[in-house]
Image (cartoon, rainbow, N blue to C red):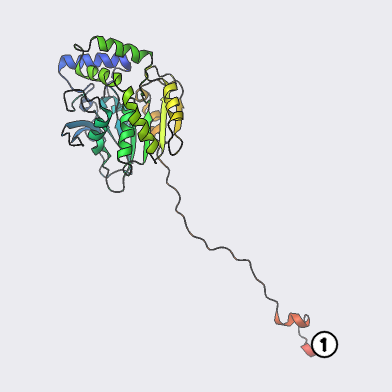
């Protein structure tokens, strides 16, 4: 059975410190929990001419699945925290979850705080197999990045999901984390340092994410826990109301859920994501209009009815 990894903001902070002390880049090594036939580590080179090597987890499939779920993680950006969900994915779906630039085993070693640069670097994730469709999921800090990716690649994204989206305003837990991290920025581990730098400088950049959302044609979904003390649900709801999208945003309030929706039962999150996949419409067929039935009178009707066995002359007599 897979090991249970630490959950929540404080546990994530401790995991980051532990990894720095042991020299590991992965925060709950998946290779020790699942075979490569279920989840495997992969990598690709960043787009936008940046040339960084980016690390990710993927669910291998013998044949491309009809839908590819691309997950842009938050801050800290650790694909490992999606492993339990990925392992439960049905065979007719595939998923890839990325360690964003500057985190875990992904290059570069410095923080990449510009969300536009992040979106450029992660664009190769949207290259799907022929006939395959992409559900793009932006989690927490990754929500704004995913919005920019969808705008730059409208023909590659069939639907966009903003999961526990972080939009510049912090809840009490995140506020404490950022305040504490800012005071110890020079001594905390790399991934925590980069998370503090990203979250602290996001608000001025949201103008780009809002503009991107306004230009999107594909369906947009927001899924948010009503107990989120990291990225308040009220901020996400206000974002959904104020951004003038081409079609209404489908906002899903998840009762009792906190910021880390991928910490809950995998089947619940997978069901929520599945509900965001556009349903295939029935094929349209042309039907000829049904014409009214025309009844023509019998030839003898103009002369009256002829009794069986009688001639017309006998009938007239």
Above or below 315: residue 137: above
Q: Quadrant of the N terminus?
A: top left
Q: Which residue is mark 1?
A: 316
Residue 208 appears anywhere in the view: yes
Above or below 127: residue 184: above
Give the image quarter of residue 154: top left
Front position in the image: 270 or 130: 130
Front position in the image: 212 or 37: 212
Q: Residue at x 29, y 18 (%)?
A: 200
Give the image quarter of residue 133: top left
Front position in the image: 269 or 182: 182
Residue 90 appears anywhere in the view: no
* Residue 76: percent from left, percent from top: 26, 21
* Residue 129: percent from left, percent from top: 27, 45
Q: Quadrant of the C terminus?
A: bottom right
Residue extending furthest toward the right:
317
Above or below 22: residue 286: below
- Residue 2 relative to residue 21: left or right: right
- Residue 79 relative to residue 252: left or right: left
Task: Sort mark 1 into few (<14), some (14-19) or many (20+) by Cα contacts within 10 Å.
Answer: few
Q: Secondary structure at mark 1?
A: helix
Q: Residue at x 25, y 27 (%)?
A: 114
Front position in the image: 71 or 151: 151
* Residue 111: percent from left, percent from top: 21, 23
Give the image quarter of residue 17: top left
Q: Residue at x 37, y 36 (%)?
A: 160
* Number of marks drawn: 1
């Amino acid at each position: 059975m897979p090991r249970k990894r630490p959950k929540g903001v404080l546990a994530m902070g401790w995991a980051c410190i532990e990894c720095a002390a042991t020299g590991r880049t992965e925060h709950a090594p998946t290779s020790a929990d699942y075979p490569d036939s279920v989840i495997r580590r992969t990598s690709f080179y960043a787009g936008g001419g940046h040339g960084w090597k980016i690390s990710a987890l993927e669910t291998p499939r013998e044949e491309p699945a009809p839908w590819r779920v691309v997950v842009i993680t938050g801050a800290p950006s650790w694909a490992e925290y999606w492993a339990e969900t990925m392992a439960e994915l049905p065979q007719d779906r595939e998923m890839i979850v990325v360690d964003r630039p500057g985190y875990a085993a992904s290059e570069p070693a410095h923080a990449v705080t510009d969300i536009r640069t992040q979106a450029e670097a992660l664009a190769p994730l949207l290259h799907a197999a022929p006939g395959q469709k992409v559900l793009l999921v932006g989690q927490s800090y990754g929500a704004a990045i995913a919005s920019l990716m969808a705008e730059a690649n409208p023909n590659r994204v069939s639907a966009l999901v903003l999961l526990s989206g972080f939009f510049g305003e912090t809840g009490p837990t995140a506020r404490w984390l950022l305040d504490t991290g800012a005071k110890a920025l020079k001594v905390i581990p790399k991934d925590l340092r980069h998370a503090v730098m990203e979250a602290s400088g996001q608000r001025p950049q949201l103008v780009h994410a809002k503009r991107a959302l306004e230009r999107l044609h594909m369906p947009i979904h927001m899924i948010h826990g009503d107990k989120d003390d990291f990225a308040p649900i009220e901020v996400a709801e206000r974002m959904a109301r104020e951004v003038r999208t081409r079609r209404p945003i489908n906002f899903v309030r998840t009762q009792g859920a906190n910021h880390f929706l991928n910490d809950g039962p995998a089947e619940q999150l997978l069901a929520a994501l599945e509900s965001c996949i556009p349903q295939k419409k029935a094929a349209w067929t042309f039907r000829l209009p049904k014409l009214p039935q025309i009844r023509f009178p019998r030839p003898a009707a103009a002369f009256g009815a002829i009794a069986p066995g009688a001639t017309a002359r006998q009938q007239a007599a």
